[in-house]
Image: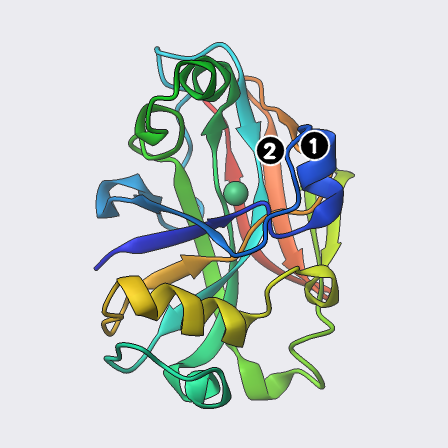
Amino acid sequence: MKIICIGRNYSDHAKELNNPIPEEPVIFLKPDTALIHKNEPFYIPDHSNEIHYEVELVIKIVRIGKNIAENFAHKYYDEIGIGIDFTARDVQRDHKAKGLPWEKAKAFDGSAPLGDFLNKNSFDDINNLDFRLEKNGEIVQRGNSKDMLFSFDQIIAHVSKYFTLKIGDLIYTGTPAGVGKVEKDDQLECYIQDQKLLEFRVK
Ligand code: ZN
């Protein structure tokens, strides 16, 4: 399986990092070794002094597909979950300045904690879904899927032009504003609406 991530999908987050608003989805990948399953700790890697959390809604692909039309994209995912796209911001800044690819900043071991999923039919409207990240009991990021520049269905249509989607693939759909640094011993908890779907400790 592969993990596909969308960058700069919320204009308030693009602005906080002084990035332009993209005209089409920004795509990058993480390997399966990036995954951390529910409640396992995240270990800060040695190669960074500035690991940022980015809370993101995640969709799980349930059908194989290529060049999927936007109006059929909803058939390719049944569940929505939540995860963190951990980012070595210092490494990313350095690599961006040098025009190098982002993998050391984005795709390292443990950079993709993943929580539980909920059936999309359990929500009134998946395009109006509140989610948030709490760090040590305080809300640090709040988002709503209505503020995504590219919707779940638009993302699937775009991504599948380049990559055949396979069963079990995950798409991290971008983070809202409020990204920040994690420190050893931080406790992170992720919610969709009022359901806690992921919690783990930083070590
Ligand atoms: Zn992200």
Side of 3 where 141 appears, left or right:
right
Colour option used: rainbow
Residue closer to the observer: 38 or 12: 12
Image-quadrant location for residue 105: top left
Q: Are marks 1 and 2 in contact (CB under 8 Å)?
A: yes
Q: Position of residue 81 (x, y in %)?
A: 51, 64
State whether residue 146 is above or below residue 35: below
Side of 202 where 125 appears, left or right:
right
Q: Position of residue 8 (x, y in %)?
A: 59, 45
Please state, as top left, top right, bottom left or bottom right, where the N terminus lies in the image: bottom left
Residue closer to the observer: 66 or 24: 24
Seen at 50% across and 14% down, the residue is: 90
Disc 2: which residue: 187
- Residue 189's tag is none
State whether residue 110 is above or below residue 82: above
Question: Few, some or many C-alpha atoms within 10 Å of disc 2 (few <14, some 14-19, many ≥20)?
Answer: some
Image-quadrant location for residue 73: bottom left
Identify the amino acid type marked 1. Asn
Secondary element type, mark 2: strand
Seen at 66% across and 60% down, the residue is: 148
Please state, as top left, top right, bottom left or bottom right, where the C terminus lies in the image: top left
State whether residue 114 is above or below residue 140: below
Q: Position of residue 194 (x, y in %)?
A: 73, 64
Side of 106 where 83 appears, left or right:
right
* Residue 98 seen in render: yes
Disc 1: which residue: 136
Q: Label 1 vs label 2: CA separation?
A: 5 Å
Residue closer to the observer: 188 or 121: 121
Image-quadrant location for residue 67: bottom left
Seen at 33% across and 35% down, the residue is: 107
Question: Few, some or many C-alpha atoms within 10 Å of disc 1 (few <14, some 14-19, many ≥20)?
Answer: few
